Image (spheres, rainbow, N blue to C red):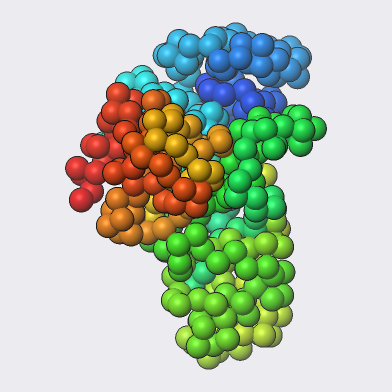
Amino acid sequence: MSIYHLLKLREQEGSSIGVAVIGAGQMGYGLIAQISRIPGMQVRGVCDVNVSAAERAANYYLGQLGDRKHDILVNKDFRKVIQQETVDVVVDATGVPEVGAKLALETLLAKKHLVLLNVEVDITIGSILSQMFNAAGLVYTGSAGDEPAATMELVEFAQSIGLDVVVAGKGKNNPFIPTANPDTCADEAKRKHMSPHMLASFQDGTKTMAEMNLLSNATGFIPDKVGMHGVSADVKTVGDKLKLISEGGVLEKYGVVEYVHGLAPGVFVIVHSPLEPVDAELRYLSVGKGPYYTLYRPYHLASLETPISVARALLLNEPTIQTIGGPVSETVAVAKRDIVAGEKIDGIGGYSVRGVVETHREAVEQKHIPIGLIAGDVVAKRNIEVGQFLTYDDVEMDTTTTVWHLRQLQDGLFR
């Protein structure tokens, strides 16, 4: 039975899934509105530090329900929202690692499932959190509609029909501006009704790196090189460019994650079959000229698809996308301007650092700092030049944050 029919059945039985949404920005607002159209699912709580944003989302949602109206708690304290008895699944739409760490623990204690629209916390402490939720019989998952999960759908589809996936990735949505910060993004962010910090994290590349980091952790694929290649291509040419160097492409190896300029807002996988009859069939079906074929989904619907993950968590007790164990890759902090000794360093989407993906092994060997740990009061111990990868020798970390403590547990568990 499909998820839609299971939801319809749930509605007929009068036992709708109760959802709490933490974060009522662009993504959270769209999700909350969308749930008003979904059978067997209700928004039971909305939280945001900006209470007016939470109220706006809740009021819009209630306005779409007609005679189906029900109680909904609006509060800036996520604990109160999560702890409601009517809540079954919590959605983290904050995008902030420290907030995500705290609300994940609260969700775990409340014995609720957790769906993340917060890839930033997932790539930082997702390995330990998934272990904790799994041990409690709860679902911890990334969200359908985000590029990692949308790409994962293609990976699993290809593997399920016996094809070898050699590359998996996404199109980059924004121009790459490594020095972008909230000030340079302010006007565009205002026009797009976005947070300037969020837009800065898109433009400076951090979001793309984090998304492919999550896909890496879920598949075991790794970046072919630090930061990936970021070639420019379309659906017809991407398979030619993302081949081995010996075959005329740019890759040193297969089994990699990658991003491509020119494919946004879609996601893709490049597949191969060693079986001659299968290869001939793929050519006959006009999938490509072979021997490598691109399977492409030309869109991802972001938070509008999140209800699918909410339903899968509660109805099927299964995640949409989840790390396979310890970290495979890391998104580490790189200075996007000169930083002076004694200066406080801000985190994702700010003025100080951007994220670059590399393998977990490289990060450990080089003592590079996962960008999600740049939280709280992190201070430079010496001058750091623009473009320099930050190490633990360069900065005084804030060891009081929740994300720091959970990362220490994770590092101890996955050595």
- Taking the spot 49% from the left edge, 73% from the top edge, the residue there is 166
Is residue 137 visible in the rendered image? The answer is no
Is residue 41 visible in the rendered image? The answer is yes
From the viewer's perspective, tell me whether residue 184 is left or right of residue 207.
right
From the viewer's perspective, tell me whether residue 299 is left or right of residue 23.
right
396 or 318: nearer the viewer: 396
Give the quarter of the image for residue 30. top right
Residue 112 location in percent, x, y?
A: 40, 25
18 or 222: nearer the viewer: 222
- Taking the spot 62% from the left edge, 38% from the top edge, the residue there is 181
| Rendered position, 47 above or below 202 | above
- Taking the spot 56% from the left edge, 15% from the top edge, the residue there is 49
From the viewer's perspective, tell me whether residue 195 is left or right of residue 212.
right
Residue 368 location in percent, x, y?
A: 35, 49
For the N terminus, which image quadrant? Answer: top right
Q: Residue furthest bottom?
A: 276
| Rendered position, 194 above or below 79 | below
1 or 407: nearer the viewer: 407
